[in-house]
Image (tube, grey):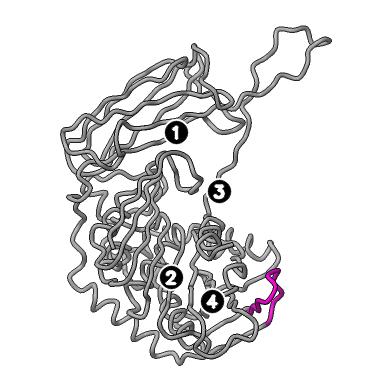
Amino acid sequence: MSFRVRLFAALFASCLFLAGAVAAEAPKSNVPAESAKPAQKTVWSFQTRTDKSAVGYKVGEPVVFTVELLADGKPADKGVKVAWERNGDDGVTETGEAESGAPFLVTTKGTAPGFIRLTVKALNPDGSPVMNGKRPVALTSGAACDIDKIAVAPEPADFDAFWNRQKERVNAVPLKELERVPVKVGTPGVVCYDVKVAAPGGKPMSGYLCMPEGAKAKSLPLTVVYFGYGVYPIGKNDGMAKDRIVLSVNAHGFLNGRPKEYYENLRNGELKGYAFSEQENADPETTYFNGMMLRLIRSLEYARSLPEWNGKDLTVMGHSQGGMQAGFAAGLDPHVTKAILNQPWMCDNGGAAMGHLRGGWHIKPTPALMYYDTIYQMRRFKGEVELMAGLGDYVCPPFGMTAIYNEAKGPKKITYTQSVGHNGNPRGEKIVLEKR
């Protein structure tokens, strides 16, 4: 398995929002109960496509979505009502209805640079949602107009001064490995350690360090992996470490490899709803993200201190909250050479006030959180950037990834996937933009 394949496997394994496919509830049979056979459950789905590249439209140009309801992967019969809603970064909302049995068109246009979101839902005759098990049958897709002209809110004037102070706080705590405990892994020829390193804020930098057994000094590239939102045991990523050092960092400084009750207690107690406190988010040094980023700065210092690192190749990567952390790592440490951000969180924090789209799960913006915008950190990075964006993702809207791509100074690549939500599962057409 190539490093790229292992890398993307690790990215998707770190995702918090996992997708589950479940079958739809079957309609009641009219056959008498004594002779009835178990009804075959139908799995419903939508497919959506655009009449040209989904991110290639101009303002004012017709944007045409073709939508079809499928039953068990085939065109559904007539009779199922479909409701659709179009909204966008331009503030325009449109709604309509259609019926299954044939593809139907939704034609709209963008009135300002940005993204258009189309949500479709299958409805029963009484207006209730058609279900796949416990999930409503729905799909969110997207398109975009003049993506090279989108704008974000201004960053704080003292952004660099603030982060220089945070680096000074980390430097005030001596770089010291507190613990290195060997742990078993399933990859032959790879060794792994549970490590803890001193950091400011009362909690250590905590993670797993993997590398080829018997690695020589200055012989290996280095990859640092960060993880998505939540409280759970992180992966070791030993499968990636056949030809490199891999440091997998937990965001919270807690213990690794503990029984599930340990993480459940944290999830329901100390770390319940972390980062969402309006009181904490009133000050950039009291927000939960502050301690996370202090440990992040230390994780990079520690990784660069490893004698096996070749001193030149340093990749950071992650999904969602992990993508946010990878973006901060790239902006804060000039030694980083490549940043791989899969649907990164906390982009375009000032966008809500500008009318930019977002979903229901997001942190209420505050002036303090403007210091924690992934876009602002990434504009300081000069290395190679690789981005993944879902055109159906409004936990981490594609607007933020696009802004990062637009501002990237070095080699850059972004992959948009049609109808993909935050779970990252492959759905529709992929659109790749790249500059070298």
Provide the residue designation for mark 3. 18
Number of residues whose C-alpha sits closer than 10 Å to that of mark 3, classed few (under 14), some (14–19) or many (20 or more): few
Q: Callout 2: helix, strand or loop?
A: strand
**Label 1 neighbour load within 10 Å: few <14, some 14-19, many 20+:** many
Q: Earlier in the sequence, mark 3 or mark 4?
A: 3
First reached walking from the N terminus: tag 1 or tag 4: 1
In the image, what residue type sits under mark 2? Val
Mark drawn on residue 316: 2
Q: Please provide percent x and percent y for residue 294.
A: 41, 77
Disc 3 to disc 4, how far (Cα)? 28 Å
Q: Nearer the viewer, residue 50 or 422?
A: 50
Q: Amino acid at mark 1?
A: Leu
- What residue is at 51 percent from the left and 17 percent from the top? 124
- Among numbered discs 2 and 3, the one appearing first in the sequence: 3
**Image coords of residue 202 (percent x, y):** 49, 81
Q: Quadrant of the N terminus?
A: bottom right
Mark positioned earlier in the residue sequence (2 or 1):
1
For the record, the magenta segment spans 182-193
Q: Residues within 10 Å of mark 2 (few under 14, many from 20)?
A: many
**Residue at numbered disc 1:** 139
Residue position for label 4 = 244
